[in-house]
Image: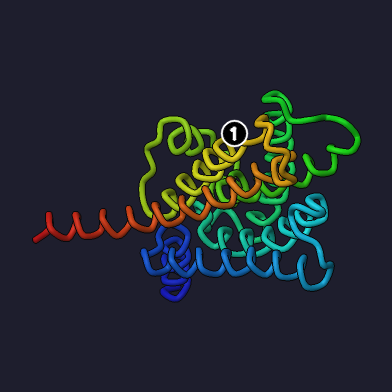
Amino acid sequence: MKEGKKKKKTETSIGESISALGAFFVYLITGLFLAVGFWVVGEKYSVDLISDPSLTLRLLWIIEFPIVVIIYSLFRRNPEKCSYFRAVGRSILGLISGAIINALGAVSLGAPIGLQSLPKTIHWSFLMSVFTVVPATAVFGASWTNWHRVFASLKPTGNIEYMILIPAYGAIIGGWFGAWPMPLDWERPWQEWPICVCYGAIGGYIVGQIVSLSLMIFLRKHKNLKLA
């Protein structure tokens, strides 16, 4: 009986908290998998984001998605009611729904919709979904209250929610800034959709991780000073 209570308490704490050091290792692992994706594309297929954006983006999200799901599902809310495999399952649904939302958003903002551009848009949308929607889906599920509080009201509580919120907004803002060179008449191959947008999104995602980690450390020190 005591062992059951202890196990339940441990599982709940795992699902609700993570230290700044733990967040650093999460970012390190997911970043390494993203780097592995670029390595596989370059070494195994001899292409890159400029020469073959569709293949590159497809491999990037296929490699990055599993590790994001595996890690963030550990931090699911109410683990005593939501099993790990349920969190994984809803992450897959989140990947698809997030890709649809990102694709519709991109098209509404002027992304090309021709047959040649369609595969690029699809795989870019899946990668953006991995950055923006999948972590939140793994942790929150379909809890509208948590989604609204974190993403709309911008009131995250705890390190996990900072890990979800700031990199997601970083990817979106980075992608938006990355789109600026597209209409310019420089006639560079990286100006084509969605190459510069993707570079901007990845850069913004990484900057968001750095900012969120810095904020965790700052808040921890601030809290310690208050307690002292």
Q: Position of residue 173 (x, y in %)?
A: 52, 38
Relative to residue 127, is residue 113 drawn left or right? right
Q: Give the answer, above or below, for where 1 lies relative to 143.
A: below
Residue density around tag 1, few if under 14, some if 14–19, many if 20 or more, within 10 Å: few
Residue at point 76%, 68% (across, down): 42
Whether residue 206 can be seen here: yes
In the image, residue 146 sits, relative to residue 113, either above or below, namely below
Residue 130 rendering spot, x and y as whole percentages: 65, 50
Which residue is nearer to you in this view: 60 or 66?
Answer: 60
Q: Circle 1 is placed at which residue position?
A: 180
Outermost right residue = 115
Q: Nearer the viewer, residue 101 or 17?
A: 101
* Coloring scheme used: rainbow
Residue 109 in the image, given as x and y percentages of width and height = 67, 25
| Residue 162 at x, y percent in the picture | 41, 49
Image quarter (top left, top right, bottom left or bottom right) of the N terminus: bottom left
Label 1: element kind: loop
Residue at the image point whose x is 34% and y is 57% from the top: 214
Quadrant of the snapshot with the C terminus:
bottom left
On screen, 13 above or below 126?
Answer: below
* Kind of residue sitting beneath label 1: Trp
